[in-house]
Amino acid sequence: MVERGRMAWVSALAPEPIGDARAQAARALERIDALLGQAGYDKARFLTARISVPDRSVLGEVNAAWNEWVHHSSPPLRVVRTENLDRPGALVHILLTAAK
């Protein structure tokens, strides 16, 4: 996590790339919650999220974890990309921006 003033950027993968994409996304989102929560950021103030997956076949699973996690009254702008994650077994990478 990088914090500048009242803004923070956090990047998360599942700590261990095991399980399906839904499980990996849920663990990455838990990590985001922990890091930003400790720094005093509220989920309702998350601004943007870039979600990277190795291919679109896992997107349904990632969306399921996202929909359980996201603040539905104030969701961040979300972009999904397909790209090589450079970590064997990794199925999702999330980069999130938040404001205080």
Image: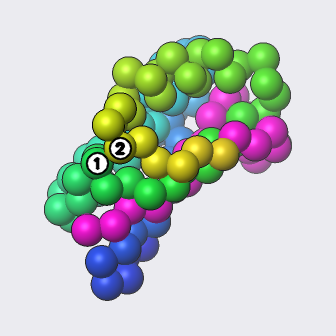
Which residue was labeled with disc 1? 44
Say if the magenta span includes residue 27: no
Vertical arrangement, residue 50 with respect to residue 5, above or below: above
- Evaluate whether residue 61 shows in this view: yes
Mark 1, secondary structure of its residue: helix
Mark 2, secondary structure of its residue: loop
Which residue: 44% across, 57% down? 47
Which quadrant holds the C terminus?
bottom left
Which quadrant holds the N terminus?
bottom left
Vertical arrangement, residue 44 with respect to residue 64, above or below: below
Q: Do the CB atoms of the residues marked 2 and 1 lie less than 8 Å apart?
A: yes
* Other-residue count near label 2 (Cα within 10 Å), few / some / many at <14 / 14–19 / ≥20: few
State the scheme by which the image is colored: rainbow
**Rendered location of residue 24, percent (x, y):** 52, 26
Q: Give 46 or 29, whichever is nearer the viewer.
A: 46
Q: Give 7 or 75, whichever is nearer the viewer.
A: 75
Which residue was labeled with disc 2? 74
Say if the magenta span includes residue 83: yes
Vertical arrangement, residue 64 with respect to residue 12, above or below: above
Which of the 4 image quadrants contains residue 78? top right
**Rendered location of residue 60, percent (x, y):** 64, 16
Mark seen at residue 27: none
Q: What's under tag 1, amino acid-wise?
A: Ala
